Image: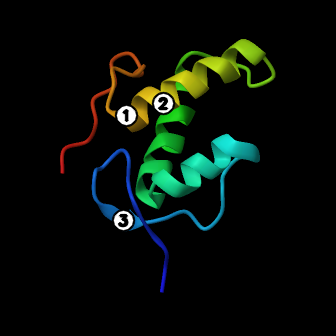
Amino acid sequence: MSRTVMCRKYKKELAGLEKPPYPGPKGQEIYETISQKAWADWTAHQTMIINEKHMSLMDPATRKFLQEEMEKFMDGGDYEKAEGYVPPSK
């Protein structure tokens, strides 16, 4: 049986991550409060931002920006979106 968490983004019990995505306390916090679905949604969104803005992950400012945007994304805040992107309708 898979592990479930009360997902911080979707506000319901969902399947949890298999392991922390980062080392240290931040990774543990994500592991305990973020679902597989929310993490997959974030990683897809993060990739879109990186590509749209031609960001380099070698730049510490980029990594800090993405960390801040991840927090906004997971908390339902006003996070960065790719310019002109319209999500597909379901």
Q: Is residue 66 left or right of residue 24?
A: left
What residue is shown with label 1?
Answer: 75
Judging from the image, the colouring scheme is rainbow
Please tell me which residue lies in front, 18 or 59. 18
Identified by mark 2, the residue type is Glu
Residue 36: x, y in percent? 47, 59
Classify 42 as above or below 14: above
Res 51 visible: no
Neighbor class of circle 1 (other Cα within 10 Å; few <14, some 14-19, many 20+) is: some
Q: Nearer the viewer, residue 20 or 37?
A: 20
Determine the residue positioned at 32% across, 64% down: 13
Q: Tag 1: residue type?
A: Asp
Q: Are marks 2 and 3 in contact (CB under 8 Å)?
A: no
* Type of amino acid at the residue the image marks with label 3: Leu
Q: Which mark is residue 65?
A: none
Residue at 57%, 55% (x, y): give it: 31
Instruction: Using the image, determine if residue 24 lies above or below residue 47.
Output: below
Name the mark on residue 14: 3
Q: Is residue 74 above or below residue 81?
A: below
Question: Upstream in the sequence, badge 1 or badge 3?
Answer: 3
First in sequence: mark 2 vs mark 3: 3
Q: Position of residue 5 (x, y in %)?
A: 42, 63
Tag of residue 71: 2
Residue 23 visible here: yes
- Between marks 2 and 1, how big is the CA–CA gap? 6 Å
